[in-house]
């Protein structure tokens, strides 16, 4: 069969053969191919969606070539410096920063919804003590459907907003309990006199029979990590949430699907994988060998925390986290040899042609593990903290998707299997 080609010629003449080009507010334009199959019997083939805009969204803009990340138009660096996670969650969900009055109401709503139904606490006991916190979170968040699904109508905007706030409010206790359960410690409850990130810390590390003085520097660093991880346009886990939501599934089930997708080492699981990699490298002397392995096509070893599907320049989040890592380690008086290995690894890789040619830079996960470890989080909680933060983005995309009505997402395929054949008659 001869190879056929379709040539895309961008023109101003809207003749009947033309496919419209859609202009975004920022970033690349898109060819509207919705009628491609109906008109030409052709599908567009794009495994991994490298060239596919799956939806229109106004929440987050990423310019990978210039290392730009905007939440509702505000640069991530400014939000990380001057905002807080709850304000950013409100911004992502509603499109604008809250007025003082709106912020007060939002804080109140979160404070009223941050406890878990006592029966939900039984779910944790059903897991093995050594269950990975992400396995627990997938299960418990999905189980929220059994407690709240019937009391909400996703066609009702108020119900939708309430479900979104409930998820943001309850995730800290779910994340903390996913860890404390493994230690056998009884679970502390949220304290509404504390801010969001301080509550995460006291629920994670505090004992119910004792005070837990939260270190403000550590709480601020955690809040910054949550801001940096809150959203990132149509990444794998957010696309998973949107695909699940397109069938009309309830928000708790959709967020549970997002948690499952985030867990993978190529995505949110990379922060845990970075630390394991740095521990495996063990010393600065072993860096050349690690670099060689990362470049060796016959070796599955990759430099975890390096590279990105979109950023072909610095991930702006990685720079903010690197700075925060230095601040927290010096504040806590910690000398972590892994930080030295990470910095040296970054320095060497960024001078190596293999990484330079492929535009592989440190991404958000490269330093976050070192920072979270310094703050006392066990390695298996790193991705759980990522999921806690990304809940703000997931619920915002879930809310945004309810406004559009393109119906259920249903990708097609290029079928490469067997042609129709007869079932052999049984002897
Ligand atoms: C996150 O999408 C998002 O926005 C995600 C995220 C978010 O906020 O939601 O930003 C969070 O998931 C960050 C990414 C965390 N993952 C890792 O750090 C895992 C390590 N990185 C790689 O697995 C990889 O870079 C990906 C998955 C992140 C991106 O892969 P791409 O864009 O599909 O790159 P590719 O597989 O097409 O690789 C292009 C080339 C290949 O070499 P050649 O075949 O051209 O010779 O680069 C090489 C790859 O082998 N390469 C790497 C590498 N990443 C890519 N080589 C060594 N080490 C790496 N990390």
Image (cartoon, rainbow, N blue to C red):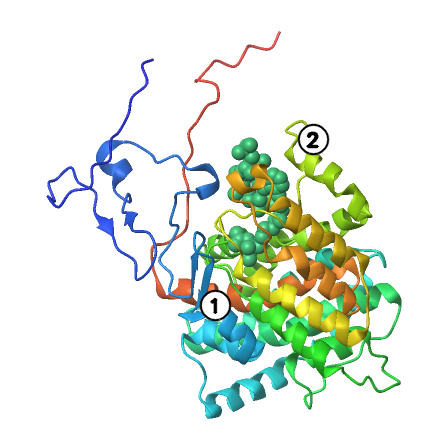
- SS label for mark 1: helix
Say whether residue 399 is left or right of residue 40. Answer: right
- Which residue in the structure is indicated by mark 1? 396
Query: Is any part of residue 218 visible from this angle?
Result: yes
Instruction: Please identify the quadrant where the N terminus is shown.
Output: top left
From the viewer's side, name the closer residue of 342 and 381: 342
Q: Residues within 10 Å of mark 2 (few under 14, many from 20)?
A: few
Q: Residue at x 57, y 41 (%)?
A: 355
Q: Residue at x 57, y 71 (%)?
A: 227
Residue 7 quadrant: top left
Q: How far apart, in angstroms, are the residues tagged by discs 2 and 1?
A: 39 Å
Say whether residue 373 is left or right of residue 305. Answer: right
Q: Residue at x 57, y 56 (%)?
A: 258
List x then y, in percent, for residue 285: 80, 44
Instruction: Please identify the quadrant where the C terminus is shown.
Output: top right
Q: Does any atom of ligand 1 lie closer than 8 Å to the CB of label 2? A: no
- Which residue in the structure is indicated by mark 2? 299
**Ligand 1 falls in quadrant:** top right
Say whether residue 305 is left or right of residue 136. Answer: left
Q: Earlier in the sequence, mark 2 or mark 1?
A: 2
Residue 379 quadrant: bottom right
List x then y, in percent, for residue 22: 25, 52
- Taking the view exactly as shown, the residue that stands out farthest to the top is 427
From the viewer's side, name the closer residue of 204 and 344: 344
Looking at the picture, does residue 296 appear above or below residue 284? above
List x then y, in percent, for residue 151: 54, 74
Looking at the picture, does residue 5 appear above or below residue 421? below
């Amino acid at each position: 069969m001869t190879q056929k080609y379709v040539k895309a010629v961008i023109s101003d003449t809207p003749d009947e053969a033309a496919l419209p080009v859609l202009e975004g507010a920022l970033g690349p334009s898109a060819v509207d191919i919705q009628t491609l199959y109906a008109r030409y019997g052709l599908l567009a083939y794009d495994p991994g969606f490298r060239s596919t805009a799956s939806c229109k969204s106004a929440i987050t803009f990423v310019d990978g070539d210039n290392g730009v990340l905007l939440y509702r138009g505000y640069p991530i660096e400014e939000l990380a410096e001057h905002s807080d996670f709850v304000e950013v969650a409100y911004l992502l969900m509603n499109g604008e920063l809250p007025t003082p009055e709106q912020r007060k109401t939002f804080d109140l709503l979160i404070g009223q919804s941050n406890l878990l139904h006592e029966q939900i606490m039984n779910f944790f006991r059903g897991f093995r003590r050594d269950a990975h916190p992400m396995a627990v979170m997938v299960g418990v968040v999905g189980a929220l459907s059994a407690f709240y699904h019937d009391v909400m109508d996703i066609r009702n905007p108020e119900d939708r907003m309430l479900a979104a706030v409930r998820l943001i409010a309850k995730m800290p206790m779910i994340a903390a309990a996913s860890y404390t359960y493994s230690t056998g410690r009884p679970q502390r409850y949220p304290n509404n006199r504390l801010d969001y990130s301080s509550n995460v810390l006291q629920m994670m590390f505090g004992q119910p029979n004792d005070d837990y003085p939260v270190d403000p520097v550590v709480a601020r660093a955690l809040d910054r990590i949550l801001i940096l991880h809150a959203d990132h346009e149509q990444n794998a886990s957010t696309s998973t949430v949107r695909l699940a939501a397109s069938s009309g599934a309830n928000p708790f089930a959709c967020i549970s699907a997002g948690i499952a997708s985030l867990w993978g080492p190529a995505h949110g699981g990379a922060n845990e994988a970075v630390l394991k990699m740095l521990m495996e490298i063990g010393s600065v002397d072993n860096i050349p060998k690690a670099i060689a392995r990362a470049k060796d096509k016959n070796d599955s070893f990759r430099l975890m925390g390096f590279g990105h599907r979109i950023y072909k320049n610095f991930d702006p989040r990685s720079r903010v986290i690197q700075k925060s890592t230095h601040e927290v380690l010096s504040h806590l008086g910690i000398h972590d040899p892994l930080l030295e290995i990470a910095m040296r690894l970054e320095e060497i890789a960024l001078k190596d042609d293999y990484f330079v040619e492929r535009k592989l830079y440190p991404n958000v996960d490269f330093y976050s593990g070192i920072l979270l470890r310094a703050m006392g989080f066990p390695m298996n909680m790193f991705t759980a903290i990522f999921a806690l933060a990304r809940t703000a983005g997931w619920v915002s995309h879930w809310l945004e998707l309810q406004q559009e009505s393109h119906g259920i997402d249903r990708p097609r395929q290029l079928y490469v299997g067997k042609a129709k054949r007869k079932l052999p008659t049984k002897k």
